[in-house]
């Protein structure tokens, strides 16, 4: 009888000790640990585009906040090097925000797949600006720091851009 009682006590002690362990494998992780870290994780279709159009504002830091987006130049790209730069940018870690940052965009990009628009990206790349690329997805803003390749490509894109007909 004592042996049976002793076995029950050991089993109960083992169960209690197991429930109080620090083993994280059995714990439910908070939602923040389950949040995706890259834009392509929340929107995989963003890696599927075959061309893009870059709209660069002519005077993004002018004094007239209402006017600066109306005058722009355009650069279209289908070459793999420019597409790669954007796809790599979309692999960057993001910061999600419910509010728009108090920054002026220098332009935006339209990503296309087979002639249909997939997404619009907004960017600011000048040293005096907030330096990021962002997109709007399901009502939230997703900001990514510029990759070095994106930052280096911006001056080239600005030179190649033309005033639309």
Image (cartoon, rainbow, N blue to C red):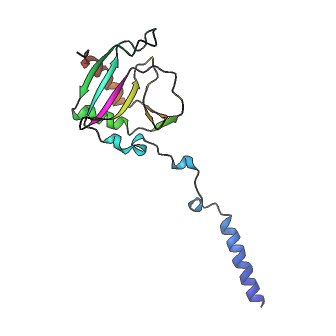
Q: In screen coordinates, is 98 left or right of 112?
A: right
Identity of the residue drawn at 58% across and 62% down: 26
Q: Residue at x 76, y 85 (%)?
A: 5
Occupied quadrant, residue 145: top left
Residue at the spot 72% in from the left edge and 74% down from the top edge: 13
Q: What are the residue bounds of the magenta stretch?
A: 100-115
Vertical order, 24 against 54 (above or below): below
Quadrant of res 62: top left
Residue 33 x, y percent position in the rendering: 54, 49
Locate the N terminus and report the quarter of the image it occupies: bottom right
Image coordinates for residue 21, horizontal then vertical, percent: 65, 63
Q: Quadrant of the C terminus?
A: top left
Name the one closer to the observer, 140 or 11: 140
Which of these two is toward me, 132 or 51?
51
Give the total number of marks visible in the rendering: 0
Judge by depth and name the residue closer to the eye, 75 or 14: 75
Tell whether 133 sits left or right of 33.
left
Give residue 98's quadrant in the image: top right
Q: Name the side, left or right, on which 68 lies relative to 110.
A: right
Q: In screen coordinates, is 77 left or right of 58? A: left
Q: Residue at x 51, y 25 (%)?
A: 101
Q: Is residue 112 magenta?
A: yes
Residue pushed farthest top?
A: 63
Q: Residue furthest front?
A: 116
Residue 17 is situated, as x and y percent measured from the top left of the image, at 69, 68
Q: Position of residue 34 (x, y in %)?
A: 51, 50
In the image, residue 148 sits, relative to residue 28, either above or below, namely above
Q: Nearer the viewer, residue 80 or 108?
A: 108
Name, please, the residue furthest toward the right.
2
Examine the rendered structure and indicate whether residue 10 appears above or below residue 140.
below
| Rendered position, 129 above or below 21 | above
């Amino acid at each position: 009888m004592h042996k049976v009682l002793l076995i029950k006590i050991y089993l109960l002690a083992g169960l209690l000790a197991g429930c109080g362990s620090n083993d994280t494998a059995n714990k439910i992780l908070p939602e923040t640990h389950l949040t995706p870290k890259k834009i392509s994780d929340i929107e995989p279709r963003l890696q599927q585009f075959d061309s893009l159009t870059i709209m660069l504002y002519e005077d993004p830091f002018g004094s007239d906040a209402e006017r600066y987006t109306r005058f722009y130049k355009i650069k279209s790209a289908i070459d793999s090097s420019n597409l790669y730069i954007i796809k790599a940018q979309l692999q960057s870690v993001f910061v999600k925000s419910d509010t728009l940052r108090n920054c002026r965009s220098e332009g935006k990009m339209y990503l296309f797949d087979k002639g249909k628009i997939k997404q619009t990206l907004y960017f600011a790349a000048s040293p005096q600006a907030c330096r990021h690329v962002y997109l709007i997805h399901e009502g939230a803003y997703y900001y990514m720091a510029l990759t070095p390749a994106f930052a280096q490509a911006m001056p080239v894109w600005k030179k190649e851009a033309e005033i639309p007909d």
